[in-house]
Image (cartoon, rainbow, N blue to C red):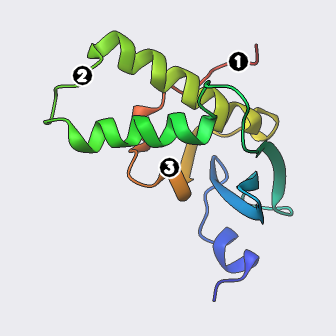
Amino acid sequence: MYTLEGIQLPLPEDRALIGWLSVPLGNNTSYTWGYVIRKTGPVKWVKLDREEPRATEKPTFLERTRTFRDKLVLQPRGRHASGPRGDHQDATALGSHWVRPFAFARGGITHLIVIPSGPLLGIPSRRFAMPTADP
């Protein structure tokens, strides 16, 4: 088992670990939290969203992320059903949803080390169009 200090010790000053944790609450409801670990200081947590059963046909971000991941995995290498523009739009939206909430911890960070979990497993971090500024 790793301690926070054991993770921080080899971490360069200009790097941060980011990751996500979804906590199921039952009744198809869950909370998703993101975390940031820097060279020093406590782990910083941010609540991303609450996924609940929906009354509309609009897909949730978890569903959109799974669809994007499946498209990457199932399509032949270099060919995507929606084409480059659709892929870029999907990547930008997902990057904004999953990464933008970490903007508060970006000061002095030049590299993010992504620890994927849940629907993000299988999506290379380079596929996300990382947002550069808050909306």
- Please give the residue where the numbered disc 3 appears in the rendered image: 120
Tag nearer the camera, 2 or 3:
2
123 vs 94, left or right, is left
Is residue 107 shown to the viewer in this render?
A: no
Which element is circle 2 on? loop
Q: In this view of the protein, which residue sits in the foreground, 52 or 122?
A: 52
Res 43 label: none
- Please give the residue where the numbered disc 2 appears in the rendered image: 81
- Please give the residue where the numbered disc 1 appears in the rendered image: 133
Q: Quadrant of the N terminus?
A: bottom right
Tag nearer the camera, 3 or 1:
3
Q: Which kind of residue does numbered mark 3 sit on?
A: Leu
- Between marks 2 and 1, how big is the CA–CA gap? 29 Å
**Residue 42 locus on image (x, y percent):** 86, 63
Local crowd size for mark 3, using a 10 Å CA cut-off: few (<14), some (14–19), many (≥20): many
In the figure, 18 relative to 134: above or below? below
Is residue 96 shown to the viewer in this render?
A: yes
